[in-house]
Image: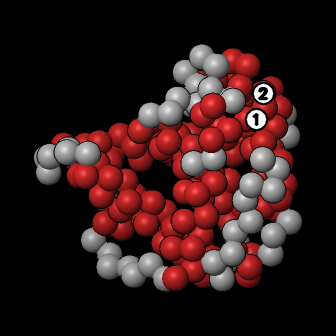
Amino acid sequence: MILNLFRKKVATEAVFAVYNAIVAQSRQPRFYAEWGVPDTVTGRFDMISLHMALLFRRLRTEPKPVRDFSQAVFDLFFKDMDRSLREMGAGDLAVPKKIKKMGNLFFGLLASLAEALDSNDLDRVEAVLLRNVLDGEAIAGAKPLARYLMAEAQVLAGQPVATIVSGKLDLGVAA
């Protein structure tokens, strides 16, 4: 991971398109207004992280060129988080620590969500959301959000990899 910071990778138009689709979907009002995801910086990071986790889960078993695409989306995600922290006034010394914490949170969420989705168990997905996104609050929103994520995982599974790496990511079909 640390070596990735020193590699100069230029994100392609397709990488930007996929990342922008994830960010746009993550901003859907339903998540915040109806399902209780906190409408805060952390809540929005969590929603982007959930959608990123869906993408990475979909692409995890693909050949190296696709994994490189996935890595480029990941790199763009954390460059955007770095930029956002700086825009919010985080100092140069604080940003790397915050990014490291965000990375740890993201990887924990990615692992637990992928495991829950792989089990195809709504209750396990709901438990991941309650623990990692909803902080044990908004219990009524956990089940619909879990259903949504499971449905989106199915939609992504049906999308050809070539379509995704060309920059077309269909999200929100199940919202």
Q: Nearer the viewer, residue 109 or 139?
A: 139
Question: Vertical placement of 94 versus 18: above or below?
Answer: above
Q: Residue 140: horizontal and vertical position, in percent?
A: 73, 19
- Which residue position holds label 1? 146
SS of the residue at dot 2? helix
Question: Vertical placement of 5 versus 53: above or below?
Answer: below
Work out whether residue 124 can be spotted.
no
In the rendered structure, which amino acid carries the disc numbered 2? Lys
Q: Residue 148: horizontal and vertical position, in percent?
A: 78, 42
SS of the residue at dot 1? helix
Disc 2 vs disc 1: Cβ atoms closer than 8 Å? yes
**Disc 1 crowd, CA 10 A, few/some/many (<14, 14-19, 20+):** many
Tell me: 42 left or right of 149: left
In the rendered structure, which amino acid carries the disc numbered 1? Ala
Q: Nearer the viewer, residue 7 or 77?
A: 77
Residue at (66%, 82%) from the top-left corner?
166
Residue at (36%, 67%) from the top-left corner?
4
